[in-house]
Image (cartoon, rainbow, N blue to C red):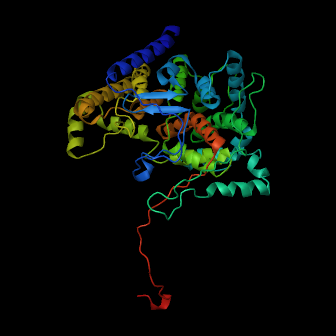
Amino acid sequence: MEQTLDDITRIVLEAKERAYRETDNEPEPNMASSLNWPIECTVGPGLEGAIACETRIGYVNGAKGWLIYRGYDIFDLCAYSSFEETSFLLLHGKLPSATELETFSKTLRRRMFIPKTQRLLLSFPVESMNPMAALRLGTNLMRQKQTYQDHLSESSSQEALHSDDDSIAMETVPEGKQHPVFQFLKGLFRPVSTVEPTDLVSSDETESCYNLIAGVASVAAAIGRAREGRIPLEPLPDLSFAGNYLYMLTGRRPTPLEERIMDVCLILHADHGMNASTFASMVVASTLSDIYLAIGAGISALSGPLHGGANVEVVSMLERIGKPSAVKKWYRTAMEQKKKVMGFGHRVYKAYDPRARILGPLAGMLATENPELKTMYQTALALEQEVVAHLGDSKKIFPNVDFFSGIVYRSMGIPSDLYTTIFAVSRVSGWCARVMEYIEHNRIFRPRALYTGRFDEKYVPLQDRS
């Protein structure tokens, strides 16, 4: 088994070498220094292309196929790190010492034990709810200890109002005031500070981040158990975060291979730029709402089919195709009917998604012992070959993270309706890190809409309307 775990490291490093070799001709990124607001950028519908803030947490380069957390390549983190260590890195901006990592891991394991929240959650009809709706509910129920919002003084509330003022006059065309002045509110949220090995919790907000990272995993596992008519399980002291999550969800101890691959999956999904759910969390936090409600907003955004859940559709698609020999005919028909092939293409990546480079061979490792999954995996490889040959060079369409992740989760015995909750369990650490970073120099999000309606309408009394 030790050799098998070493194989995972080898697979990840081989994927890294292949990724860098295949994108070597792409230009190096032009790294920006701190911005001098206001800035000019091209903005499309849905704020596409808009620059909303600065960050040191994560970086995505779509042309190079890079995913970076706090300066560390995602391939190196998957090869050598753990989800606990990666979460610490995202929150605190540095890799932990051995003592810090041990303390942090024990803290998360201890905070996965949330019987009060689970009892409250199971008083609702969780088994018949959408799993993501139940997860959002459970996250809100975790907010049992009063947060800073319950103790705001009247003066601080007044101070918060000023952050909604417009520095660029809204009705001045085309660019507002000549010299806008931007005010950033500080002080109500405290940033995540340098961590002492004996005292990880340095503020209420940091403590809430730890509660959320651990608690959302426990809530998600309890939801999965409830949907099968089973009671929630407590975490085990000798399992990692990923191992405990699998155990609390499935009711069996994961194999070392499953535990390590789930660990990699959680690392891969922990952060990914200013995506919709991250933005939703930051928008809510920018109003100085507390972090539980901000993370609940992220879960709500992730529940939408345009953001989370594509891996469910991939598994369903592969089941419909059936076998590798049926791929060519199925793909030809899909192209003729202009159907979307799930699991391919990405809003950012114009190179092979680095997460898919890692998950593909890992899905193959898990599928080898299961004939049904082996067929599904081979079908996926055949479909990948068809799509990349047809659209890879011309349209830069390659597999994304969702193409193989569903096969990984299916091989672990996880029902497909819970796949998006796994995404959320991982992304909480990234959401928390992004929120805590943004509120250090908070300014409430306040974009504009261009009014295209009519003016000078005359009010007609109800009785005179036809």
Q: Could you say which quadrant of the image residue 295 lies in?
A: top right
Left or right: 162 in relation to 300: right
Q: Above or below — where is 292 with respect to 66?
A: below
Query: Furthest residue to the front?
Result: 178
Residue 251 appears in view = no
Which residue shows up at 58% across the image and 28% down it? 246
The tally of labels here is 0
Q: Could you say which quadrant of the image residue 359 lies in?
A: top left
Left or right: 234 in relation to 363: right
Query: Furthest residue to the top?
Result: 3
The foreground one among 411 and 344 is 344
The foreground one among 25 and 237 is 25
Q: Quadrant of the C terminus?
A: bottom left
Left or right: 398 in relation to 335: right
Which residue shows up at 24% across the image and 46% down it? 338
Residue 29 appears in view = yes
Q: Above or below — where is 129 with respect to 198?
A: below
The foreground one among 152 and 34 is 34
Q: Above or below — where is 304 with respect to 453?
A: above
Q: How far from the left and from the top, in percent, is residue 218?
A: 64, 35
Q: How far from the left and from the top, in percent, is residue 406?
A: 43, 33
Which residue shows up at 40% across the image and 37% down it? 348
Left or right: 215 in relation to 263: right
Which residue shows up at 50% across the image and 65% down it? 171
Query: Furthest residue to the bottom?
Result: 464
The foreground one among 175 and 316 is 175
Q: How far from the left and from the top, in percent, is residue 462?
A: 49, 87
Q: How far from the left and from the top, in percent, is residue 204?
A: 75, 39
